[in-house]
Image (cartoon, helix red, strand yellow):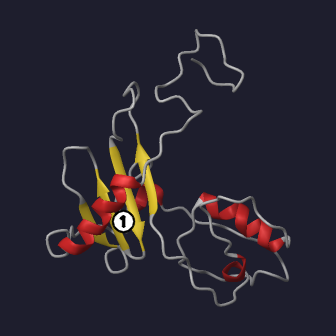
Amino acid sequence: MGARRPRHGGKGSFYEGGIRVPLLVRWPGRVPAGATDDLAWAFWDVLPTLAELANAKPPAGLDGAPLAKRLLGEKQTPPERFLYWETQPQNQGGKPPWAVAARRGNWKALRQKPHLPLELYDIGIDIGETRNVAEAHPEVVKQFEAFLKTARTTSRTYPVEEPLWKYEPLKTGFVR
């Protein structure tokens, strides 16, 4: 039996073991070889960062932040924001997400199912998410609860339910 991994959870989980993945960058002469950084990025940061590197203006209305300076090893204060994840079981018909998670700085909150209380972890000191500190930090839980009430936007184009491929495709590529 192998050694226990430091992060809790695995693929499909909202614990760090399921959502934390490395961003690997290789750019000889620009990005220092062997450099590491613990900044939490999200996919929506990639386009603004690439635009900044290309001296181009990214499209308006993006949620992402340009982080090129940080990528190149320069000082850059990361944006103060929440990162958000959710999962929706099939055929829920617009009901609230089944599980949600959010991160802000070193605070990480998650709810495994809609009826369960919010779990809270300080992943700066507990990367394995072994100590739920929600009771000790009710003010932080309140901030996450407020955020989670407004974090979700239903897509106008992506179907709420899993597509049933027996229907004709719409012009958008999705099904009715």
- The answer to whether one can see residue 152 in this image is yes
Q: Is residue 119 above or below residue 73?
A: above
Query: Where in the figure is residue 99, as x and y percent of width and height?
Result: 33, 46
Judge from the rendering whether residue 169 lies leftward or rightward of residue 86; answer left or right: right
Q: Which residue is mark 1?
A: 3
Q: Residue furthest front?
A: 60
| Numbered disc 1: secondary structure | loop
Q: Residue 39: which quarter of the image? A: bottom right
Q: Residue 110: which quarter of the image? A: bottom left
Query: Where in the figure is residue 1, as x and y percent of width and height?
Result: 34, 57
Q: Nearer the viewer, residue 9 or 100?
A: 100
Query: Where in the figure is residue 150, as x and y percent of width and height?
Result: 39, 54
* Residue drawn 42% across the image and 54% down it: 151
Q: Residue furthest left?
A: 135
Judge from the rendering whether residue 66 lies leftward or rightward of residue 15; answer left or right: right
Q: Residues within 10 Å of mark 1 (few under 14, many from 20)?
A: few
Amino acid type, callout 1: Ala
Q: Is residue 32 above or below residue 16?
A: below
Q: Is residue 77 above or below residue 150?
A: below
* Residue drawn 65% across the image and 11% down it: 168
Image quarter hosting the C terminus: top right
Q: Nearer the viewer, residue 70 or 37?
A: 70
Q: Residue 130: which quarter of the image? A: bottom left
Q: Nearer the viewer, residue 43 or 175?
A: 175
Q: Nearer the viewer, residue 141 or 109?
A: 141
* Residue drawn 37% across the image and 79% down it: 124
The number of callouts visible is 1
* Residue drawn 41% across the image and 71% down it: 104
- The answer to whether one can see residue 1 in this image is no
